[in-house]
Amino acid sequence: MLKRTFVTIAAAAGVFLAASPFVVAQDDSTQIPETTLTAPTIGYASVNGLDMYYEIHGTGEPLVLLPCGLGTVDTMFAAILPTLAQTHQVIAIELQGHGHTADIDRPLSYEAMADDVAAMITQLGFENADIMGYSLGGGVALQTAIRHPEVVRKLIIISAVYARNGWYPELLPGMLSLNAQSAREMMGSSVYKTYINVAPRPEDWPVLITKLGELLKQDYDWSEDVAALKMPVLIVVGDADSVRLAHAVEMFGLLGGGKADGESNGLPKSQFAVLPSTLHGGSILNAALLLPVVTPFLEVPMPR
């Protein structure tokens, strides 16, 4: 039962279970590199009634990283953060109820968490920042750009959808299974142990899982909002992702990509990448595949 719960949740809900042996076998591509980070600046920002945890690494243009559901900074981004911090001031955030950020009496919603991210950027003294989000964090990043475009320079969406039907339909029943019972079934797992080791209130575990379930049950379609985005966007998916590949292509089309006039009018400002032999749960954060796509996108000068 535990194995089925892990596989279903990892695939359908976009939560980080890559460290679990039930989801992804260990291989060299997902291991943390030998390069280690210097001690980051760690703090909490009071935003919208939430004390939101953040870490700041490196110097340069600000780049906000948003983990997926149940993801923390160290479990999510350890393989790519050292390289990114060589050229950017990386602000890695843990969302409402996740990791070191305690939950508050508020449902989980993409919109509310996006408001938190925008408020965090402003409170830390940045006029704007590049934002990269993975899975659930990608949805939050997308809503941040939709609701607060003035604070987003460039946007990177990894393994995320702009409409609920962007997930493979076989995965949707798994989204309905997140509740207090599945939270109990996950106790003893690696992701549960990570949570209780850092959470300010470990007893909130079933609350977090239930709120994730309620969020993932909701239907949505942000296609009109995506089409209205003005900043450059990079879409990244795996060729064996939980996101329908056709949906990711459609998102690129909403942003002006995939058109027949490319030869005459030049490249679109947004980009699209499919990583080979890559799953949704963890392996898409393979530094050897992801960084060669992300880094050039971040280095391209902003269009005038």
Image: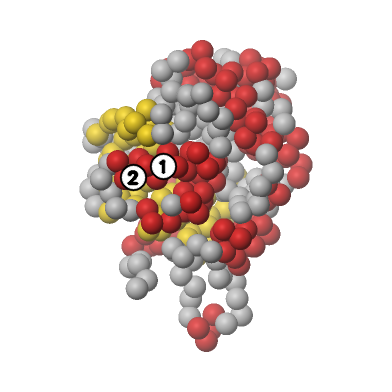
Q: What SS does tag 1 mark? A: helix
Quarter of image, res 25: top right
The residue indicated by pointer 2 is: 121
Name the spot of residue 48 as percent of width and height, x first. 41, 34
Do labels 1 and 2 touch, CB within 8 Å?
yes
Q: What type is the residue that disc 2 sits on?
A: Ile
Q: Which residue does the image show at 71% across and 49% down from the upper left?
A: 165
- Visible residue check, residue 88: no
Of 83 and 71, the residue lying toward us: 71
- Residue 255 in percent (x, y) is at 55, 66
Q: Which amino acid lies under the numbered mark 1 shown in the image of this protein?
A: Val
Q: Which mark is residue 117?
A: 1
How many marks are shown on the rendered structure? 2
Against 189, is 224 above or below?
Answer: below
**Residue 100 is drawn in which quadrant?**
top left
Figure colour scheme: secondary structure
Between 104 and 67, the one nearer to me in the picture: 104
